[in-house]
Each structure stands twice: as C-alpha cells, then as structure tokens.
Amino acid sequence: MTAIALTAADKLFANGVRALQPVTLAVEEGEFVTIVGPSGCGKSTLLRLVAALTEPTTGRVGLWPGAPAAFQADRRRLAFVFQSAMLLAWADVEKNVRLPFDLGHARAADRELAAARVNRALAVVGLEEFRRAYPRELSGGMQMRVSIARALVTQPALLLMDEPFAALDEITRLRLDRELAELWVRERLTVLFVTHSIFEAVFLSTRVLVMSARPGRIVGEVAIDEPQPRAESFRLSTAFAGYCARLSQMLATGMEPTAESAAA
Amino acid sequence: MSRAVLRYGAPLGVGLLLLGAWQAAVTAYQVPSYLVPSPLTVLATLQQDWGLLSRSLAFTLAVTLAALLLAVLIGVATAFLFVQSRVIEASLFPYAVLLQVTPIVAIAPLIIIWVKNTSIALVVCATIVALFPIVSNTTLGLRSVDPGLLELFRLYGAGRWDTLVRLRVPGALPYFFAGLRVSAGLALIGAVVAEFVAGTGGTVSGLAYQILLSGLQLNIPRLFAALFLIAATGIVLSVLTALCARLALRRWHESELSPQ
C-alpha cells in the first residue's frame, strides 16, 4: 500500500520565497526513501509537508491515501526525528521517551502499556541502563538515540527523519546509520529520510531522490538494489561507488540553474 | 577541599582582616564610639539591645518576606498573562516599566497616606520594588522555548495546557530563579526605604526605624548594630534563593552544574 502520496504539492513562504516547486511523489510501505540535495533546497520543507507541520500552497499531501479515513487520521502512525535531539533538558531519559504518551494524540489510558513500550524502545536503542540519566549527561550520539527511542515509542509505521545524524561526528554517524538500517528491517518501518550525505543515502536507502537547488524540485531518482540489511563491506564495494557517482552527477546537474528557476 | 576553602574561606578571611584593621584603627586612634564604634562595641550593643533589635528584625523580615511572596504571586501571574497574547503584553508592559523606574521614595508617601495600616503600606511599597524582575524574567523564560520543541509538541497533538505545563513552565524556571534572587534583595531594600519614609509616623518599629532613631539620639553603636542586621538579612535572603535555584535546577541546568 502507498504510505505517502504527494500530488503536485508546492510551497510558497509568506514572504513570497518559493521553497518547493510542485513535487509528485509516492512512497510505498516498507520503503526506505532518502532525499538528498544541497542546503536550503527545500528537503526539510518536503518532510514538514508530509508531517503536516506546514500546509502545501497548492497540490495535495496524503498519508495512506487508499486507507479508510479513520486510519488516515490516526497521527500515531507517524513519528518525526529532528536534526537535533530535541529533548526536554529537565526530564530524564525515561520521561523523554515517554513524552508522546503524556501528550494529546497518544495519551496513554493504560499506564502499563506506556511503561512496556518505553522499556522496549529503550532496549531497541540500547539505553536501558541510562533511563535515569539527564540529556546533558549523555553524548550527542546517545541523545540522538533517545530521540529515536521517543519516535519509536508509539510504534509508528512511518518515520520521518530530517538530517538526524548531521550534527554528529563521523564515527558515531556510521554506527547510527548501521543501527538504523537494522532497525528498519526489524521493525518493518517505512522511512522518509533527508540528508546531504550521498554515502549515507546510498548505504541506507532502497531509493534515493535527488533535489535541485532552491526552489527545490526532484531532478532524479536512483534505486539501490542491494540486499538488506547491508554489511559494512557494502561501503567499500564497486557497486557502492557506482551509486555514489551517479548521484553526484545528478546533484551537479541539479545545481545548475534551470530555465524555470531562472524565469522565476 | 581547596574549592571549599576558596569559596568560603577566602571571603571570610577578608572579612576578618577588615574587622581586625577596623578594631585596631579605632583602638589606636581612640576614636570615640559616637563617631565610629569598634566592631567589638557593635557586638556588645547587639547583645545588650537584642530584645529591641530582634523585634525590629522580625518586623522588617516579615515585611520583606510578605512583599517577596506577593511579588512572586503577582509577578508570575502577570507573566502568564503577558505570554497569552502579544497585545496584552504590548499594552501593559510599559506600565510595568513605569512602576519599575519610578523611585519608591517618591511614591511611598502617597501609599502610606492612602493605605491606613502602615504595615500593609510598607508591604505594598516593597512589593512594587520587587515585582519587576520577576515579571520580566518569567515572561522572557516562558517565551524562550525552542521552536523545535514546540513543533514536537504540536506533532503529538499537545494542547495549550500541556505545552504550558510540560514545556514553557519548566523551561522558564532558570529565568524565574534569576529574577527571584534579584527580587529578594529588592524586597528588603523596598521595605527599608518605605520604613524610612514612614518612620516619622512613629508607629512602626523595623530596623530602618531603629537606624533613624539611633541617628537622632546619636546612639551610633546601635545604628551600626541595626545596619549589620539589615546587611545580614540581605545575605541570608540571597543565599536562600540561590539554594532554592540549586535544588530545583541542579540536575539539568548549566547554571547549577558543579564543575568537574
């Protein structure tokens, strides 16, 4: 089933700046789709459209368009991981992960269910021993793990991730990439991932979309047909280099001003 | 260990040194105690007049604490009102500033005339002085929320109440405590200044009144003793509010971290 459907959705900011040219895009359930593009190209705007954090100026954005209305309206199927961990500084790890159950949509009628889900999410990211720690006592990578645990705690079907590892050091980033790849297979998630790292995109995704410079437009698409989950050795393979080369080529083409954007 | 010595030992050492020099100078030059009493004379007066001075201390302390409590209640409520809408804040904030910049000595006589009960009049004056830091800091704190966290809350369908209680209020605590510490000092200053203005009425018996009276009677040792008590009260208040902040924030806020 289709999880995300964008139909000619575009975005004009209030100040008249066009962030996104009309985008038509379908993401199937179980896919790991990554959007790569230069900074400020509208990747984040696209993600925010999907999360309904902002409305498209024209066009339509739909989640599970084929499903019944009640299913579509259930916001718990969606979770968002931001560029920074976005944790509550005054709450320990456990309370941070529990947060979705304390707020609106996901308010837990059943405390035991919430407790069990929190335990499971902490186990998934390997932070059970740190449940009483406060965010500032954790490293950047661990903070991001808490953020991912918080996203997983509602057992979402769709995970939206906006450059989640961009602020981390390379070593931590590689490890979290690997963990995310395993997580995606194990939890049967649908992921829409935004990054400006071609390597990260190729390693993680089943499909990579390339966006042009602002105003953003999808200029190309590369399917990464490799078995999952991928071993670290995939990064060193000729196939990996080939995918990266193709994506670099597309990005370079996308950077050149097009006739449309020159006219705009 | 050496940190504790530095933190408490060093200022204590300076204090003792200064007192010693003072004592020595007064003794050496035989300065009469109606000009500058020696520290030991002040200590003796403090002991001798303790009955009188302790009652005055209790009165000034009561006025100060009542004013601080009122300033916290009114200040926090005002801050909550301000963050509800920019219109409210824009309309009322200039008047909060007006209240802040008008010297309390200038309006204290009016308040003392208008409010029949002098004790209440003093509390009103001190509250006015102590109010502003709490209002401005708490308002700033309630507003200083990470927009990303606001978005996260929206994503999970958090209502206004949840956002206030789980996000804005905890986030505002460090700002509030910074305001509280300033206000505690201001409440004491407000209480003392108001008492000076009201003092000639002769019905109040706070520490400022003792200073005024001792000055008129040239009882300089008692004046110094009262002065010492006011300063000590200020220090205790400052330490107590810092302690409150520490207890509330030590686990998570940068300002209260003990350096490793």
Image (cartoon, rainbow, N blue to C red):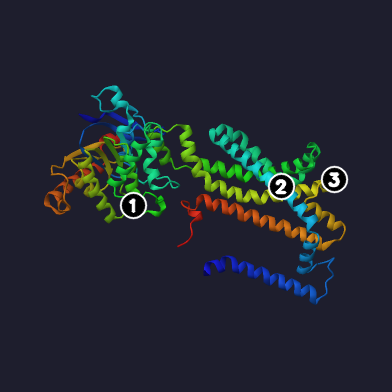
Quadrant holding the C terminus of chain A: top left
SS state under label 1: helix
Question: Which of the two residues, B184 or A203, is positioned nearer the viewer here?
Answer: B184
- Quote the CA–CA distance across marks 3 and 1: 66 Å
Is residue A95 rendered to the left or right of residue A123? right
Q: Answer above or below: position of A14 versus A149.
A: above
Res. B62 mark: 2
Q: Residue furthest front?
A: A112
Q: Which mark is residue A262?
A: none
Tag 3 residue: B201
Residue density around tag 2, few if under 14, some if 14–19, many if 20 or more, within 10 Å: some
Both marks 3 and 2 on one chain:
yes
Same chain for the residues under marks 2 and 1 in the image: no
Q: Quadrant of residue B7?
A: bottom right
- Residue lying furthest bottom: B28
Q: Which one is in front, B234 or A194?
A: B234
Circle 2: residue type: Ala
Q: Return the chain for callout 2.
A: B
Distance from Cα at disc 2 to Cα at disc 1: 48 Å
Kindly identify which chain the residue marked by label 3 belongs to. Answer: B
| Tag 1: amino acid | Glu
Badge 3 element: helix
Residue type pointed to by label 3:
Gly
Q: Is residue B74 above or below residue A62?
A: below
**What SS does tag 2 mark?**
helix
